[in-house]
Amino acid sequence: MLHNVGAISSDRSLTVEEIKNWTVMEPEKVKTNIQKLIETNCIQVYSSGEVKRFYLTVDGIRKVLSMYS
């Protein structure tokens, strides 16, 4: 979903609330999935003040694109 909406850099990153709205998932499920993706270096955290935002890393983009090849 991050790839599809263009969240591929810190200036285009999304909050948990925004990701929840795009995916129609419960916030706790979003947080669990985000943690797994951080651990595999697929997404990066960008902190803007107290707000955490998330975006796809180069490794994450590669993983997404490999699904289509």
Image: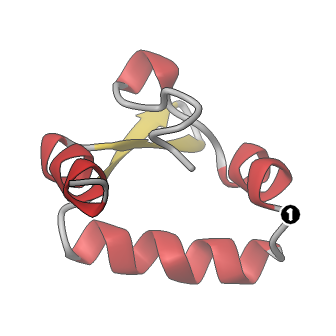
**In the image, is residue 58 above or below residue 27?**
above
Q: How is colour applied across the structure in the image?
A: secondary structure
Task: Name which residue lies at 81% across and 72% down.
Answer: 25
Report which residue position mark 1 lands on.
24
Q: Position of residue 23 (x, y in %)?
A: 76, 59
Q: Position of residue 51 (x, y in %)?
A: 61, 40
**In the image, is residue 6 above or below residue 46?**
above
Residue 14's image quarter?
top right
Q: Farthest residue in the front direction?
A: 69
Residue 55's image quarter?
top left
Which quadrant, please, contains the C terminus?
Answer: bottom left
On screen, residue 68 versus residue 34, left or right, reads left
Task: Name which residue lies at 69% across and 82% down.
Answer: 29
Q: Badge 1: few (under 14), some or many (20 or more) residues near its Cα, within 10 Å?
A: few
- In this view of the protein, which residue sits in the foreground, 61 or 18? 61
On screen, residue 55 versus residue 23, left or right, reads left
Kind of residue sitting beneath label 1: Val
Task: Name which residue lies at 16% across and 49% down.
Answer: 62
**In the image, is residue 52 above or below residue 28?**
above
Label 1: which secondary element: loop
Task: Name which residue lies at 57% across and 50% down.
Answer: 1
